[in-house]
Structures are given as C-alpha cells and as structure tokens.
Amino acid sequence: MIKRLGFFLFACFCFLTGNAQSIYRENSIKYGGIEEMKTYHLYNKKNNPACDLKINFFFPETYINQEMLRTLQSRFVRSFFGPEYAHLSPKEATKAYSKAYEEKYKAAFEKSGVYKEEVQKADANSEDKNDYAFLYSFEKTMRNTIFFNSGNLISQVVNVYEYTGGAHGASSTRGVVLDVNTGTELKYEDTFREDTEGAVSALLLANLMSARNYTGPEALADAGFTFEILRPTGNFIADDKGMTFIYNPYELGSYVLGIVEIFVPYSDLVIYMKPEATLFRWGRNHHLGNLIQFETSTLHRDSVGTIIQFSFPKAYYDQNTLVKLQKLFITNAFGEEYISSNLLEIPAEFYNRALKNNQALENYIQENKFYYNSNGLISYAVEISKNDSLRETHSEKGFVVDMTTAKNLLYNDIFKPGTEKEMTGLLRAKLPSAWNNEMNKIVPHNNFYINEEGIVFIYRDHQILLRYPEISNYSKISWEKGITGGY
C-alpha cells in the first residue's frame, strides 16, 4: 500500500533540516513523500515466513524550473532505488521496486521450491518449523533524510536496513550531494585533486581521533578499528560548514563499530579541492584565511647554539602559484641560489655552505614570523639574531606577499606617488623623543609588514606602526575598514 506523506511529514522534514544559522537562502524546492509498507507470506499463507518492505521516500515535488525538477527527481530515484529505476517517476519507481522485491523473494524460496523441501524435511524429522523459519523471513527498511537544503546544494542521506536470515541484519548509509544549478551529483574525484589523497587521509584520521578523544593507535585498536590507512571515501554529505565522510559497517573495522561518520571542516579541506569544484566555492566562502597550508623545516645545532627555521607554503589549490610562492619564500629567506634545493633540506644546506665558506654560524637563530594570512595577502618577517664574541646583532626583514602575482609588494605598490612627505611626517610623529637623533633616518622604505592593525615599518632599533585609518588617504588600497576592507 502506497501512502502520500502529507503536511505533517513535510513539516517534520522542515524542522529536522532547518538551518537558522545559515547565511544561504533555502532552496525554493517543495518536497513530497511516499510511504510504502508491504508484507508477503510465502504461498500467501499467513503462518509462513514473510518478506517485509518499508519505504519512506522524500523527493522534490515542485520547483520553478520544471526541467531541473525532473532531473532532480531522477537523481533522487536513482540514489534511493538504483539506476534501473531512474527513468521512472517517484511514485512509479516505488511501485516497481516494491513489486521487484516481492518477486525476488518468491523466486528465491517459492518458485525454486526450496521452502517446500525444507518443510518436508522438517515434517519427516518431526522438527519444529519455527526452528528454521527465521532463515526465510526477510525484512528491508529504506528511508532518506534531507540533511541540507540551501545555497543551491542538497545533501540527502539514504539509510537501508536489510535482514536476509542469519545472526543479524545489515545497515548501510549512503550520502548524496546534488548541485541544484546543474542537477549533477557531486563525486569525490570531481571535488579533490588526484595528488591529495594522502593529505585528506591524514585529515580524516586526525578528526576521527579528535572527535572520539583517542590518544593513539592503541585506542583505535581497542575500539575495534582495524584499518592500516584511513582512505577517503566517495560516500559523503556536505553542508555549509564542511563534509561528513561515511563509512559503513566493516569498512573500517569490526561490526560493533556500526556506521562511522567523520566530519572535516571546509577550512581544512578546501586547499585540496579542484578550483572548479562546486564545494570549492563553499569552502572558499567559509574559509577565513588564505587557502594555503604551511610546513616548517628546522635545523638544530645545540652544540653551537644555532637554530635555523624555515616556514614555506606546502599546499595550495593552484599548483602553479604554489611553486612560485615557494620560490619567493626561499629567495626572501636564503637567496635565489637555493631555489632548486629541496625545501625541507634548505636549512641544513644553508648551514653547511656557511661552514664550507668559513662562516661558522655559531649562536645564530633564523626564523620566519608570520603576522597576517588572509584576503590574498601573506605578511611575515625573516628574523635573524647573531651573538658572537664581539657583539650581539638582530635584524628583521618584512614582507607582504601578493598571492595573486606571487610577488613581494613594495612601498610604491601600496602607496600613491607624491605622498612620501606626508608618510614621512606620520612616521616621525610616532618616534619617541628619546630617539630624536634618529629622526633623519626615518623615511618610508620597503622594509615593512602588515597585521590586523596596520602597516609596521621596520628600522634598525625600532618599529613604527601606522594604523589603517591613518594611511587611508595616501594608499592605493582601501584600508578604511582595516585589512579586510579590500585588498
């Protein structure tokens, strides 16, 4: 019997999936539902084993774009019942699937004569039929839930429980993410770059450990996990915050684990996505900083008091830009002669070259210190401290990197021509009276970095901060609202 799920179920759907916090408008799709409950006893005898089928199927029922509505309905039918039903309407597919389920059950035990043979054996041995009847009692429950429905994105979860005899039934969950603009289902391979599986795998493991408060591999094993590598799965859902990867029973370990869900926020995933992917746009819109990941290589020579620390871009969605940024960071810290060197080995190579040139780096500390990383800009400084037998010195070179061009921004790139006099006045006005003898040396130059407050000019013994409102009249960039106001 097929029932149309009325307003009550639709209201429940709205309640369960409403997202008052979302910045996106809910998709203008009205959902309908079908409920199917069917029981068939072998040979139509009530006391015989039976198959029970229960279906709760939600699907797009009305939408302003009729062609897209048909496409979305087909996608829902395909993901719920299977590709062989995709050409049917939701109501037709439900009827057809229900009939096929019953026919498959009949074919297995009724038409094949298997059940009658077992009954005859039981009668001959005076066995109780109930001892084996459960082997021929099948059950299947299917339902889908709309997990997210906003910003031209639909995420649904299809849950299936099936019992076909034996110790216990089997549960499975499948996530389906649809782009309402194109009607396409989002696939893992269309979302992530091919070279990022290892990085995504590491994120999945880290988030699994964190969510369950596991402290090490022993905790995973004790819980029943048996995987060697937690590989990404194409079974996922997505919302406005990130992606949830779904692993069905036995995929990661023992049955007792059940269905394992691992949420990873866009802020972690987006740098591994293809720029043309639908979810890249979502990740980009929700990522507060630049879509870049850094790695640090450090050389320690404790015997001579030397530490060389080099932080560089490790991952970025645009590979060509990534290579350019890596070369720029190398040049800024060590010089162009190291561009062809292995990024992780540069600190050691720099130290060894100094030794060969009789420039022993004793009591030498070099590191990158980051001040800003957002809105297409990276700002940091290379700090170097030396302490030999004669004196101690400290130097700092600031950089503002434009990620679009992968180049350092210089003073003339930021400030309008003809404003040097005004900028000089601002800088000197900030100089403490104790440093008046340094006044003539305080002029605008290319040694600076930016942070959330403003631009910081670096001089030999001191730094001067000019806040964004102070420099707005002299800058080519609009700073009225701070750095976020629009580079």
Image (cartoon, grey):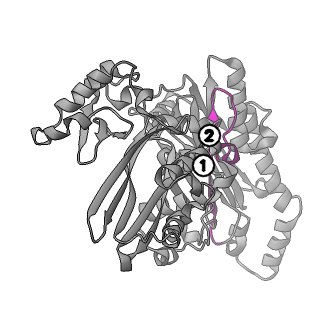
Describe residue 60's horizontal placement relative to residue 402 as left or right: right
- Residue in the foreground of this view, choosing between 432 and 143: 432
Residue 399: percent from left, percent from top: 42, 42
- The image quadrant where one finds the C terminus is top left
Residue depicted at 61% across the width and 35% down the height: 278
In the displayed image of the protein, which residue is found farthest to the bottom? 125
- Please tell me in which quadrant of the rendered image residue 301 appears: bottom left
Q: Are marks 1 and 2 in contact (CB under 8 Å)?
A: yes
Per the image, is 87 magenta?
A: no
The magenta span reads 167-192
- The image quadrant where one finds the N terminus is top right
Describe residue 89's horizontal placement relative to residue 380 as left or right: right
- Please tell me in which quadrant of the rendered image residue 20 appears: top left
Residue depicted at 30% across the width and 38% down the height: 457
- Please tell me whether mark 2 sits on a helix, a strand or a loop: strand
Q: Return the residue at label 1.
A: 236
Residue 3: percent from left, percent from top: 62, 34
